[in-house]
Amino acid sequence: MVGINLTVGKSVGKYNSISGWTIAFSVAAMSAIAQADPRQTQQDAEQALDAGDPATAAGVAQDLLTAAPDSFAGLMLRALAQSNLNDMAGAAATGRLAYRAAPDDATRLQAARLTAAAHFQQGQFARAEIWLRRASNHARTPDEADTVARDYRSAAQANPLSIQTTASIAPSSNINNGSVDGILSFEGIDLQLQLPEDQRALSGITYAGSVRLGYRLSRDERQATTAGLLLSGATYSLSRDARALLDASPIARVQGLTGHDFRSFRAEAGLTHTRGDLSPLGPVSATLDFGGYWEGGVHLVNYRALTLQQGIPYGPDGRFTLTGSTQRQDAVSATVVDAVTHDVSAAYNLRLANRDQMQLTLAARHRDGGFENIYDEYRAWVGYAFERPILGTRLSTGVEIGYRHYDTFPTTLDGRRDRFASVTGTAVLDRFTTFGFAPTLTTKATRTLSTANEYTTSVVEIGIGIQSTF
């Protein structure tokens, strides 16, 4: 039998460290090939590979394929010989054929990993990632799954292009974050008005998605520079109750409002530069973003933001992250105003002894949008993620509380004060993983109590989405 190691990648510095990943075709792995084609010619090819003579092995493997063009044994042996001859293009092409001819999950796994390694060696990192996602479909043990995931992370780290996508469908009790009571009252005046129906809580379904692209422009042991693009949006469909509420209003009925009228879209482009030689505490990064926001098809604002971040490793399993940002919002529509927002936050992430993860985040914001549009906000978030799956499901949960204060507000005498809280639970259904993606189920409940009654809101939603398991 034959044993071969394909080692891909090497450590090239602090910000360009690709952990070496190895695809090992051992005697045990090749035994499946022996069962597929036990003829003497196959043994000759294996012995040639063992003896370090891949050229002879390739010739003998070709003899196998001449007799049986779809022989998995012949294809796999030829791919191994080509890889040893440094013919990675040939190894990738033959590996694809071997994958199609593989008789079971064990052999498909090996063929997919070999094909991924051949693409990696050619610098075709995206193709390597695709083949490793295919390989994940055939992993049947935790060790096999961990090996594929480790290989994928190495390929993703080497790839200058990164793509992150999200998609979700979420039934919601309040798609527009509208008022629960539907009442507009003026403090100190015995007067109450009913809010327009489109500003009251409307139930329905949220359809949301995003694509985030990143391209690494440069990287060495001291620094990394990445350009990014984010496109995200959401649209909605209304429930029967929400539709009935709108139809009861002559104005809303004339306007013909639908869930699509509440749609939103954001486009953002940015540049991030990270350095490891500026601070003795850890890496420092600076991000400059430019973007625009649309709602109901109307372009509302353009914005630009500068974000600074300091990472601070703490012990073997802990990390502090300090973040500060300033955003300038320029109004495009007459319905909004110019504003400047300053944010600061401190987060602590810790991996516990049982490998569970815990996160604590404290954040503060000051937003100045002119008279009666100035507020301070404070938030605290605690999150917990369980490492060990329960019935094939990975669980995480989080709780957030916060406070927002306006010094002055149109409908109150002494400003506006909001108190809000939310609870979130997420289940990643690993048992249904396909191509390295697993369905997710997220439940979130949010409640805001405001001294301005029209801003008292309540939202309960259940979201179904997908998430990469790598």
Image: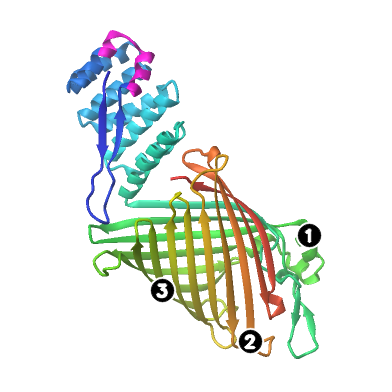
Residue at 21% x, 32% y is 86
Q: Residues within 10 Å of mark 2 (few under 14, many from 20)?
A: some
**Residue flagged by tag 2: what amino acid is it?**
Gly
Residue on which the image places disc 3: 324
- Using the rendered view, name the quadrant where residue 46 is placed: top left
- Tell me residue 95's x, y (percent): 34, 28
Residue at 30% x, 21% y is 27
Q: Residue furthest right?
A: 248
Viewed as shown, does residue 263 lie left or right of 118?
A: right
Residue at 48% x, 58% y is 358
Residue on which the image places disc 2: 415
Which residues, given as a range, are shown in magenta? 28-43
**Please, what is the dominant secondary structure of the magenta stretch?**
helix
Residue on which the image places disc 1: 241
Secondary structure under badge 2? loop
Mark 1 or mark 3, earlier in chain:
1
Marks 1 and 3 sit apart, C-alpha to C-alpha, by: 43 Å
> Which image quadrant: the N terminus?
top left
Looking at the image, is 229 positioned above or below residue 165? below
Residue 35 in magenta? yes
- Tell me residue 457's x, y (percent): 69, 70
